[in-house]
Amino acid sequence: MRKNKLIFIYLTILILFLTSLVPSTVFAHKMLVEHVEDGIIYIHYDNGTPAKIATVTLYDEHGNILLEEVANDHGYVYYDGETTVYRIVADDGMGHRASSVKSEENNEESIPSFMKALLGVSILLFVAAFFYYRN
């Protein structure tokens, strides 16, 4: 019985050690649609990189397609400024899809992601310290 427990502990330590040797970095990002002004739309990811291959579709209030165009190398799409655009949909073909209704305010997050992560870790550390020192 003791031998099985010892093997289990060594095996667990070995697995944890081996998984720590394989670095894996994960980047999560989203695509944003920014209506700069009438006639100009800027499509970019939240890290500021322009979405060069995004297909942008403009719709009117009835859902009719007004324009379908691929963003240029700088992430911009230009259209006739006198066209009344109700909805903008951008799709880069790799799983990112963003849409914006022209009447909406710019709803980018005001709190950066790293601050949210820092707050979450701080709360977890506070709870852990609370239960550790409560005796």
Image (cartoon, grey):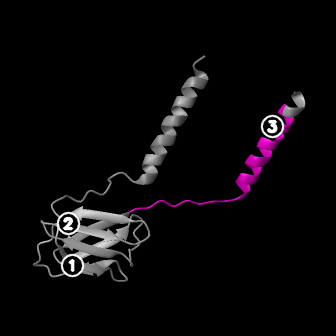
Q: Which residue is mark 2?
A: 87
Query: Residue at coordinates 31% horizontally, 70% vertically from top-left?
Result: 90
Query: Residue at coordinates 47% horizontally, 47% vertically from top-left?
Result: 117
* Residue 20 relative to residue 5: left or right: left
Which residue type carries mark 1?
Leu
**Residue 132 spot, x, y in % from top left:** 61, 25
Q: Is residue 6 magenta?
A: yes
* Residue 17 relative to residue 127: left or right: right
Picture quarter containing residue 44? Answer: bottom left
Query: Residue at coordinates 51% horizontally, 61% vertically from top-left?
Result: 27
**Residue 16 spot, x, y in % from top left:** 73, 47
Residue 9: numbered disc:
3
What's the CA distance linking mark 2 and mark 3?
57 Å
Q: Nearer the viewer, residue 118 or 91?
A: 91
Secondary structure of the residue carrying tag 2 is: strand
Up-down relation of residue 131 to residue 106 (above or below):
above
Residue 67: numbered disc:
1
Residue 83: numbered disc:
none
Which residue type carries mark 3?
Ile
Q: Nearer the viewer, residue 49 or 57?
A: 57
Which comes sooner in the sequence, label 2 or label 3?
3
Q: Which residues are magenta?
A: 5-30
Up-down relation of residue 67 to residue 120 (above or below):
below
What's the CA distance linking mark 1 and mark 2?
11 Å
